[in-house]
Structure formats: C-alpha cells, structure tokens
Amino acid sequence: MGIVKIDDALHEEVRKASTVMCRSINAQAEFWMKIGMLAEAHPTLSFNELVRRQLAAAQLRVPEPALP
C-alpha cells in the first residue's frame, strides 16, 4: 500500500464519482486505475466488455435483462 499524489481537481472528481457509485474515494480511484490499465492492455475492448470479463473472471453470474 502506498500514497499516490493526484491533482486536487482530480481528487474532487473522484470524490464526486465515489458518492454516485457508492464506493469509498480510494475504491473509486482504484477502480478507475484498474479499468485504465485494462483499457491500455486491451485497446479494442469497450468499457462494458472489460467489466463483463472482470465479472466472469470473478465467476459472478450476471443475469440477462428480461425481454419485453
């Protein structure tokens, strides 16, 4: 564990997003860093595909939405 220095304006954006996403500020920053790292490693995948693959790797079954 370490300390990461970020710009005050970015910290404020992380704080706002963490409130909306019901995450701690640290968890929100960690999520953004992880998604950014995955996006750089897999530039052809969309955000949704990256998240879907992470959920699958965690063996989380996500139900399909019901059709009307």
Image: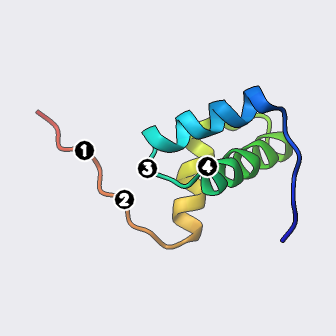
Q: Position of residue 22 (x, y in %)?
A: 43, 50
Circle 2 crowding by C-alpha within 10 Å: few under 14, some 14–19, many from 20 = few
Q: Nearer the viewer, mark 3 or mark 1?
A: 3
Q: Earlier in the sequence, mark 4 or mark 3?
A: 3
The residue at 29%/50% (across/down) is: 64
Residue 46 showing in the rendered view = no
**Is disc 3 placed on a helix, strand or loop?**
loop
Q: Cβ–Cβ below 8 Å for labels 2 and 1? A: no
Circle 4 crowding by C-alpha within 10 Å: few under 14, some 14–19, many from 20 = some
**Is disc 1 placed on a helix, strand or loop?**
loop
Circle on res. 28: 4
Apparent side of residue 21 relative to residue 4 in the rendered image (left or right): left
Q: Dot 1 corresponds to which residue?
A: 65
The residue at 10%/33% (across/down) is: 68
Q: Cβ–Cβ below 8 Å for labels 2 and 3? A: no
Real-space CA distance between mark 2 and mark 1, rounded to the nearest whole angstrom: 9 Å
Q: Position of residue 30 (x, y in %)?
A: 70, 54
**Is disc 4 placed on a helix, strand or loop?**
helix
